[in-house]
Image (cartoon, rainbow, N blue to C red):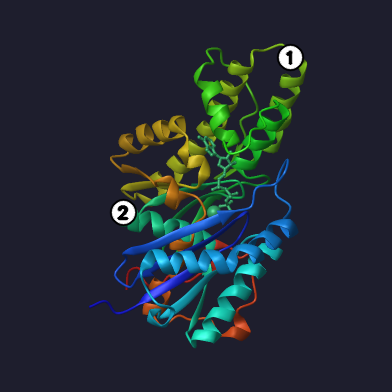
Amino acid sequence: MREGYCLGIESTADDFGVGIVSFDGEILANVGDAYVPEKGGIHPREAARHHARVAGKVIAEALEESGLKPKELTVIAFSQGPGLGPCLRTGATAARALASYLNLPLVGVNHCVAHIEIGRLINKVEDPVTLYVSGGNTIVAAFEAGRYRVFGETLDIAVGNCIDVFAREAGFESKGVPLGRIIEEKAAMGRNFIPLPYTVKGMDLSFSGLLTAATTLLKEGKYKIEDLCFSFQETIFSMLTEITERALAHTEKKEVLLTGGVGANNRLKEMLKIMAEEHDASFHSVPKEYALDNGAMIAWVGVLSYKCGVTTPIEKSHVKLKWRLDEVEVPWIGG
Ligand code: ATP
Ligand code: FE2
C-alpha cells in the first residue's frame, strides 16, 4: 500500500511536462509537449501560449498513463523557478487551479534541485558532484550543510546556448534534431585543433569570448568546419571538466552526476568519466527522458518536500524567475 502520489508540472522554458511519482519513488507517468519555434530561439510569450493550450491535455495524458484518478493524488508540485516568466506563470496557474479544485496541498519546486534529485533517484546515486548543462543553465553543484551549494557556474551565457548560437551561425538549422548533436557529429570528424579562448575564472566559466572567436573564424572560412567544431567542443568541455574536477577535489565526494541536454554528448561523458576515475569517483549520466526538462523530476521533489512537511501556501506561490539553487533548503538529506 503506497502512502501517496504527487503530480508535478514543469514549465520553465519550452517544455510543458507533467509527471506523477509515488511517495516511494516509482515514476508512474512522465509526459510532455514541447513548443517548437518556427525559427531561432524560443519566444517566452509564444511558449507560454503553447503551454496554456496544451496544459489540460498533458495533465489528462499523465493521469491516464498513471492509471490513477485525480482524487487519488496527494499533492501537486510545480516548477516555481528559475525560468522564463510567462512560461513559469502558466504552469503555476495550472498547478494552483488543480490544487484548489482537488483541495490538495501545493509545493513550489526549484527546477535545478529537481534536475539533481531525479538524477540521484534514477541512478541510485547518494551524494554526487553534479554538472547540470543545458540551454539555460551551466552549474556545478554539490550538497553541503543543508543545501546544494553552487561550486561553479557561467558568468555569462549557458553552454547549450553557446553551442546553439554557434551552430546557427554555421547554418545548421534543422527541426527536431538538437543543434548540439549536429556539432557533436561534425566534431567527431575533426582532426586539427585550433586554439580558442579558454576562460575559467576561479571556479566559474565564461563562454562569450569563445563564442565570438569561434564565430569570427567561421566567417573567415579559413578552417574546415569539422576542425572548428572539434576545437569548439574540446575547449568548452575541457572548461566544464576542469571546474567539475575542482569541485570534486574540494568536496572529496565519490560520485559525479551529469545531467541536462548537453549531457547527451558522448565526448563530454568520456572526458568526465576519465576525470572521475582519476579521483576514484564513479561517473553517472542521466537518460534523456529525465535529463531534459520533465514533469517527473518536479513531482519527485514534490514528494521529497511534502514528506518533510514543506508545502507552499497559495499566497507564496508566485514564480521566482531567478531563484538560485543555493537558496533552497534541502531537509530530506542528512539529519
Ligand atoms: P533548461 O531549462 O534546463 O535550461 P533547456 O530546454 O534550455 O533547459 P535542454 O533541453 O536540457 O535545455 O538542453 C538543450 C540543449 O542541449 C541545447 O543547447 C542542445 O543543443 C543541447 N544538446 C542536445 N544534444 C546535445 C549533444 N549531443 N551535444 C551537445 N549538446 C547537446
Ligand atoms: Fe532544465
How far from the left and from the top, in percent, is residue 109? Answer: 51, 69
Residue 80 in view: no
- Between disc 1 and disc 2, the foreground one is 1
The answer for how far apart the CA atoms under marks 1 and 2 are is 45 Å
The residue at label 1 has a CB less than 8 Å from ligand 1: no
Question: x and y percent of residue 4 in the render?
Answer: 34, 78
| Type of amino acid at the residue the image marks with label 2 | Val
Vertical relation: 36 (above or below) 232: below
In the image, is 205 to the left or to the right of 288?
right
Instruction: Residue at 38% x, 34% y: name it.
Output: 275
| Ligand 1 falls in quadrant | top right
Q: Nearer the viewer, residue 212 or 84?
A: 84
Q: Is residue 104 above or below residue 274?
A: below
Left or right: where 63 falls relative to 161: left
Q: Position of residue 155 (x, y in %)?
A: 65, 47
Q: Residue furthest bottom?
A: 103
Classify residue 169 as left or right of residue 113. right
Residue 68 seen in the current view: yes
Helix, strand or loop for disc 2: loop
* Residue at the far left in the pictured view: 1
Seen at 53% across and 61% down, the residue is 111
Q: Which residue is mark 1?
A: 221
| Along the line of sight, the residue nearer the viewer: 47 or 118 | 47
Which residue is the site of mark 2? Answer: 125
Image quadrant assignment for residue 50: bottom right
Helix, strand or loop at mark 1: loop
